[in-house]
Image (cartoon, helix red, strand yellow):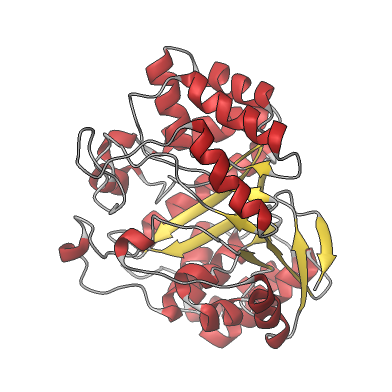
Amino acid sequence: MRSRMSTTCCESVQDKARSGERLGREEGLWLLREADLVELGQLANAVRFRRNPNADVTFVIDSNPNYTNVCITDCVFCAFYRKPGSADAYTLTVEQVMEKIQRAVELGATTVLLQGGHNPGLALDYYVELVRETRRRFPQVTPHFFTASEVTTMAQVSGLSIPEVLGRLKAAGQCTLPGGGAEILSDRIRRRLAPKKGGAEAWLTVHREAHRQGFKSTATMMFGHIEDDEAVFDHLDHIRALQDETGGFTAFVPWSFKPGNTPLEKRIAHHASPTRYLRLLAASRLYLDNIPHVQASWFSEGKKTGQIALHFGADDFGGTLFEENVHAATNFINKTTVQEIATLIREAGFRPAQRTTLYETVRYW
């Protein structure tokens, strides 16, 4: 179904966005579906510079290892997980995870985004020890650990509440939470993608409580599978509303689904195009008027598309991702170096600025 707005509303939407007035859902849908692509990018770029006025584009030196691939949630979009007892299932010891972090630190990493499956064989003490040991051994590293659904699994296995679990992680030294596991925050879509994860509120509840306890987190979106435009804006509405409530999101990070080796692969007729990505990125920048930063994903969309995204509303270029296994399980592999990221940002017309997990500038490249 097409948006009910006429293209004659173009100037009205542009005026609202430029002035900082909040856009309505139908206006957002019009931007995603009907706005001229070049004009949409220009508008999103103007709003980006109003919020972040200088020509800096930030990035973080990070790695994204995994502590287990054992999972009982059976998401149809995932090629990474293995059922308990599978021949190639694994769970690392705390010491083995520390070895991975040590290798990342030797490459200059200041953030480690640690994720795994929903493993019912792991006690809460294991997760707490991962945080505590990271803080003790590598005080320069931010443990950007565990998605919302992993936190929910910790609560279920331990018999504790989500606030209690987050409180224990915080006491061990954790202060940020990655946005993974959001996929599309539409109950209608989530029932088909990941029915065991619960609806949108399952993800939102964890981030709401994390923000209440002083954590900062990112908001993500995985698109390009079975979602439609209405589901995209269900997602954006949830993110915008929670940010109004808590102010705890630092950034919005959309990326496109990679179908290789997943149960969903045969059901996807067309992969998300670069044009779709740029449209969604720009519309998100305009609609999410309360999110400080929007990330361009060189990793999932390709380096050239990542550069173009910096002219479509993005002000951050993500991270170095020295180790990454989830996308790799779909046979999608993209690698870079710190020097290459800095070059890509400069080539796009911006000044590369290394940042922390909390978007504090560390140095310029």
Please state which of residues 280 and 176 is positioned toward the viewer in this rendering: 176
164, above or below 119, in the image: above
Please state which of residues 135 and 176 is positioned toward the viewer in this rendering: 135
Instruction: Locate the N terminus and report the quarter of the image it occupies.
Output: bottom left
- Residue appearing at x 64%, y 27% in the figure: 132
Q: Is residue 251 visible?
A: no
Which residue occupies the extreme left position in the image? Answer: 266
Q: Quadrant of residue 346?
A: bottom right
Q: Position of residue 347 (x, y in %)?
A: 69, 87
Q: Is residue 319 visible?
A: yes
Instruction: Locate the C terminus and report the quarter of the image it occupies.
Output: bottom right
343, above or below 331, in the image: below
In-image side of 193 versus 345 (left or right): left
Q: Position of residue 119 (x, y in %)?
A: 34, 30
42, above or below 260, in the image: below
Which residue occupies the extreme top position in the image? Answer: 159
115, above or below 6, in the image: above
- Residue appearing at x 48%, y 36% in the figure: 148
- Residue appearing at x 75%, y 58% in the figure: 355
Q: Quadrant of residue 168?
A: top right
Q: Position of residue 240 (x, y in %)?
A: 59, 48
Total marks placed: 0
In-image side of 257 versus 205 (left or right): left
Q: Position of residue 329 (x, y in %)?
A: 32, 59
